[in-house]
């Protein structure tokens, strides 16, 4: 393409530096150590609580990757020129999917082999205890389980999870390789390839991400159900992905890689999207609460009842004010959306409350050893180990991809439009 020469130097060469390679190696060591500690906790500690903490960390990092993957496909589908320079960091982030898959299936194997009431998903072992009409029974005696057993069985669960990861990894790999190939040969046909795969990927990805939320989180309490749960997970993932993209791009500006490339206009557009998905997350979260509470069906209202006692009442209020009102009011103002320091603050804030949101949805889902109907809120050592472990592996995967490629899609047909984008 005629534009490639003008952007080749501006985008820089393949970003391989000894410092970058050294940091990647450190991330791998830290990630491996965190995962080993988590495995040790599963084998020796309060294993259900350790497993829930690991699931929180796993879904946190996966949600960021899924949100970025959706943004990549939306950019391709709508021919969004402004986002082209921001797309490359997101492409690198999707390399986490195979490693997340490996970690997830370790949790599945643990749950399959764990003793009675020790695994994550109660329905995986029909000898696990459940409470039916105030009395303790086993999963095998649960009539609701029998109605759902065609879906909630170990073989089908594993096959579905393999399918989900096949979609995530397959489509993300095709899009990433097409983008990298266009850097080398400048062939416009790669843009068409990305658009076609994105059209299929958005549909398949929406279904897969929805069922990930249902299978991994909602079935922790298999009596409970919500038709809006998958949309909640999607909205939460998009918020986390936008916050992560803002932090990544501003970090690359600080390192000099994106200096003169990522501009105020790009930051403003990402800020506007963050505001939009903040409102969308609040709408979905409130709608789920309102519809369930208004219907007043005991089989489903108990999910919220458990989250209105002890520490969870305050966590719920923190999500209402901290995860909605603060970002909403902050992002309403133009000046806040164009100031890097302010956007770093609100992006880190959103990610922190996204993690709290996952705690709220996951942790009260199992009975605690203390006899409470749930685990109370608290950040355990094992939670930190799992969070750092999964995060370290994700950072290592990101850097492995980043260090061998151009910092921006230098021969994308829309790259000049993106470089010259203004408000």
Image (cartoon, rainbow, N blue to C red):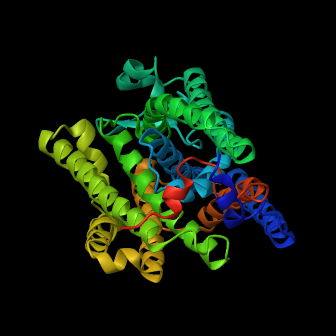
* Residue 137 in the image, given as x and y percentages of width and height: 42, 32
Q: Position of residue 255 (x, y in %)?
A: 67, 77
| Relative depth, front residue between 342 and 317 | 342
Q: Residue at 27% across / 60% down in the picture?
A: 308
Q: Quadrant of the C terminus?
A: bottom left
Q: Check the picture and name the quadrant holding the N terminus.
A: top right
User: For this rendering, which residue is in front, 240 or 11?
Assistant: 11
Tell me if residue 254 comes above or below residue 201 in the rendering.
below
Residue 12 position (above or below residue 297): below
Determine whether, in the image, residue 315 is placed left or right of residue 14. left
Q: Is residue 375 visible?
A: no
**Closer to the camera in the image, 215 or 234:** 234
Tell me what residue is drawn at x 62 percent, y 68 percent: 381
Give the residue displayed 49% in from the left and 64% down from the top. 420
Measured as percent of width and height from the top left, residue 223 is found at 35, 34
Residue 190 visible? The answer is: yes
Q: Nearer the viewer, residue 67 or 318?
A: 67
Give the residue furthest to the left. Answer: 294
Residue placed farthest to the front in the image? 2
Would residue 111 appear left or right of 416 to someone viewing this image?
A: right
């Amino acid at each position: 393409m005629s534009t490639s020469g003008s952007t080749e130097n501006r985008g820089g060469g393949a970003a391989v530096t000894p410092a970058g390679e050294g940091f990647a190696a450190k991330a791998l060591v830290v990630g491996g150590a965190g995962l080993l500690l988590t495995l040790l906790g599963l084998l020796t500690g309060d294993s259900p609580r350790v497993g829930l903490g690991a699931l929180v960390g796993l879904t946190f990092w996966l949600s960021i990757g899924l949100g970025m993957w959706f943004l990549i496909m939306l950019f391709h589908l709508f021919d969004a020129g402004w986002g082209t320079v921001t797309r490359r960091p997101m492409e690198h982030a999707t390399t986490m999917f195979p490693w997340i898959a490996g970690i997830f299936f370790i949790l599945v194997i643990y749950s399959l082999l764990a003793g009675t009431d020790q695994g994550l998903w109660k329905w995986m072992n029909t000898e696990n205890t459940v409470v039916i009409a105030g009395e303790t029974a086993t999963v095998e005696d649960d009539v609701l389980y029998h109605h759902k057993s065609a879906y909630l069985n170990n073989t089908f669960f594993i096959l579905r999870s393999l399918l989900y990861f096949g979609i995530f990894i397959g489509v993300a790999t095709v899009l990433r390789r097409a983008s990298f190939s266009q850097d080398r040969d400048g062939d416009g046909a790669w843009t068409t390839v990305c658009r076609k795969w994105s059209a299929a990927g958005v549909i398949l990805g929406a279904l897969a991400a929805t069922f990930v939320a249902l299978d991994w989180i909602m079935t922790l309490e298999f009596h409970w159900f919500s038709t809006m749960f998958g949309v909640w997970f999607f909205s939460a993932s998009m918020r986390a992905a936008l916050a992560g993209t803002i932090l990544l791009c501003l970090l690359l500006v600080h390192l000099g890689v994106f200096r003169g490339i990522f501009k105020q206009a790009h930051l403003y557009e990402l800020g506007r999207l963050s505001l939009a998905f903040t409102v969308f997350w609040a709408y979905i979260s409130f709608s789920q609460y309102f519809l369930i509470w208004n219907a007043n069906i005991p089989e489903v209202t108990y999910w919220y009842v458990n989250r209105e006692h002890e520490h969870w009442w305050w966590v719920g209020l923190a999500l209402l004010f901290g995860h909605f009102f603060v970002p909403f009011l902050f992002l309403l103002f133009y000046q806040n959306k164009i100031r890097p320091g302010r956007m770093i603050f609100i992006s880190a804030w959103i990610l922190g409350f996204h993690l709290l949101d996952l705690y709220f949805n996951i942790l009260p889902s199992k009975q605690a050893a203390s006899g409470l109907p749930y685990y109370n809120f608290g950040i355990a050592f094992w939670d930190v180990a799992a969070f750092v472990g999964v995060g370290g592996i994700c950072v290592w995967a990101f850097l492995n991809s980043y260090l061998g490629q151009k910092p921006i899609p230098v021969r994308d047909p829309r790259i000049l439009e993106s470089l010259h984008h203004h408000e």
